[in-house]
Image: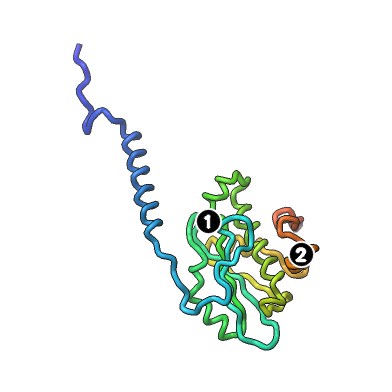
Amino acid sequence: MLSPGPRPGGDELPGARNQERRQEDRKKHDKKDEKKVQKKPAIPPTHANVSYGKHERNVMDFWQAKSDKPTPVVICIHGGSLIGGDKSGYYGRVKTFLDAGISVATINYRLMKQANEEKVVPPVKAPLEDAARAVQFVRSRASEWNIDKKRVGATGGSAGGRPRFGTPSTTTWPTPRAPTRSRVNPPDSIAPPWKEPRPRWTPRN
């Protein structure tokens, strides 16, 4: 009886070889991420890397528009398929908003990696919660940052559009108190947007 000869390329199964290649690709990708240099905005932010939550990715940059009166503010939420990207993605648009008299905040938020590590179910809740928390945090700084808390908007590109639609409106969500006071309405106490009642569609006859 003849014994089977060696497989082409050795005794290693194709699945095992593919797994090793994927691991090597991940290591190369991680090394590239480590070498990435954080982008610097052309216009220095008024407040940089301000923490708005507990996680290390809950940080934002803020640019205060020049005005004697409280200004509107736009919160920019970066894209990246919820697996990458950061607040620097909107650095190139800051000047456009400032020239229009609109203050700007660009935020980082938890990605799918961090959501899975924290066992958030479903994981997409993490960036939605962070976007809502960022909005409330900015409104809580209205007096200090010369913001009109009734004119707070949000914009997001690609995956950043999903958290953008989850941000609270100023008419339906409670107004936060300044964190320097004794009574504080923390972001964690607010009902997240996915618990809000959704409209029911009535089929037409």
Quadrant of the rendering where the N terminus is positioned: top left
Label 1 neighbour load within 10 Å: few <14, some 14-19, many 20+: many
Label 2 neighbour load within 10 Å: few <14, some 14-19, many 20+: some
Left or right, 100 with reference to 149: left
Quadrant of the rendering where the C terminus is positioned: bottom right
Residue 102 image label: none
Q: Residue furthest bottom?
A: 68
Residue named by callout 2: 173
Residue 82 image label: 1
Left or right, 158 with reference to 135: left
Regarding mark 2 in the picture, which secondary structure is present there?
loop
Q: Residue at x 49, y 68 (%)?
A: 88
Residue 155 in the image, given as x and y percentages of width and height? 59, 70
Q: Is residue 201 visible?
A: no
- In the rendered structure, which amino acid carries the disc numbered 2? Trp
Q: Quadrant of residue 5?
A: top left
Q: Residue at x 61, y 70 (%)?
A: 75
Above or below, 29 relative to 168: above
Q: Quadrant of residue 111?
A: bottom right
Q: Quadrant of residue 52?
A: bottom right
Scheme by which the image is coloured: rainbow
Q: Is residue 75 visible?
A: yes
Q: Point out the tag, 2 or 1, that comes first from the N-terminus.
A: 1
- In the rendered structure, which amino acid carries the disc numbered 1? Leu
Q: Nearer the viewer, residue 64 or 123?
A: 64
Q: Residue furthest right?
A: 183
Q: Nearer the viewer, residue 79 or 180?
A: 180
Above or below, 170 relative to 111: below
Q: Residue at x 55, y 58 (%)?
A: 57
Q: Residue at x 80, y 63 (%)?
A: 183
